[in-house]
Image (cartoon, grey):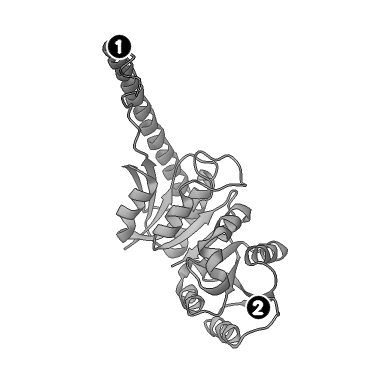
Amino acid sequence: MKNIIACIDGSPTTFATCEASAWVASKINAPLILLHALDKTMRPVVSEFSGQIGLGSQEELLNELAELDEARSKVALKHGKKLLEEATEWVIKKGLTNVEQLQRHGSLLESLIDLENQLRVLVIGKLGEDQSSNKTIGSQLESIIRSIKSHTLVVTSPFSIPTSYLIAFDGSPTSEKLIEKAIKTPLLFGLDCHFVMVDDFAAKSAAFEKAAIKLKNAGLSVHEDILSGSVDEALLKYQKDHQIGMMVMGAYGHSTLRQFFLGSNTTKVLIKSEVPLLLIR
């Protein structure tokens, strides 16, 4: 059985990530792995001024830097283990029993790529450990979204269990596949579906109507609407106006939405969204 993997890093969204991963694991009934990645520490290098500094002095400085680096690594390791222990205790209190802790050396992206063959849903906070404002995203997040081929839930803080979701459609074959996958995703079972299309002419295409019927025939509660304006602003405004708990997108799209998924609009929506974003692959 493939796992839910939650990225635990001590960032402002860590607690929300724990809450979200507990919800995902319970909803899908899959094992949960709490992952903490220890980035490789940069070792001191020989200075370009080596010819002007005495050899003995330089070696002494490098040795001191190496000792500090080793001490820093030990503290980071201890800190990570403590984070994992506390996160595990918390999700167990939420009723989960199949929980594993995993600490890996190397970048988070490298660790996730190594684990991808056992990954079903990735849960990751919008903010990285080095971020302190909701007006930004973690430095590794966009690379991870582009690289990982599993469903990814990007979590905002605080996290609330969603009762509804918004799914965007652009009429392309890719978005039609997104509808097929959304219907089969257990994570969305039982939630109200808001099905929208961004079209400045406010025209419902035949493909949109067909997709809406497909969603309804699958037993979903579907609310349809056509939006106008820029893609990111239209979707975010609709989400806020209807108090929707989660946004659902395909990780890649075409036509207008292609730029939403692959260009600057990806960053815009991740920065502005106040609710989780589920990227379906």
In space, the residues marked 1 and 2 are separated at their CA atoms by 74 Å
Q: Secondary structure at mark 1?
A: loop
Residue mark closest to the camera, 1 vs 2: 1
Identity of the residue drawn at 40% across and 63% down: 150
Q: Nearer the N terminus, badge 1 or badge 2?
A: 1
Q: Quadrant of residue 167?
A: bottom right
Residue 142 falls left or right of residue 59: right
Q: Tell me if I can see residue 277 in this picture.
A: yes
Q: Tell me if I can see residue 95 in this picture.
A: no
Identity of the residue drawn at 60% across and 49% down: 158
Q: Secondary structure at mark 2?
A: strand
Q: Is residue 210 above or below residue 94?
A: below
Q: Nearer the viewer, residue 244 or 201?
A: 201
Count of marks placed on residues: 2
Q: Is residue 122 above or below residue 203?
A: above
Q: Nearer the viewer, residue 24 or 244?
A: 244
Q: Dividing the image into 4 quarters, which one contains the C terminus?
A: bottom left
Could you tell me if the residues under marks 1 and 2 are in contact, i.e. CB atoms within 8 Å? no
Q: Nearer the viewer, residue 133 or 263?
A: 263
Q: Which residue is mark 2?
A: 224
Q: Which residue is mark 1?
A: 54
- Where residue 240 appears, as percent x and y from the top left, is 69, 61
Q: Dividing the image into 4 quarters, which one contains the N terminus?
A: bottom left
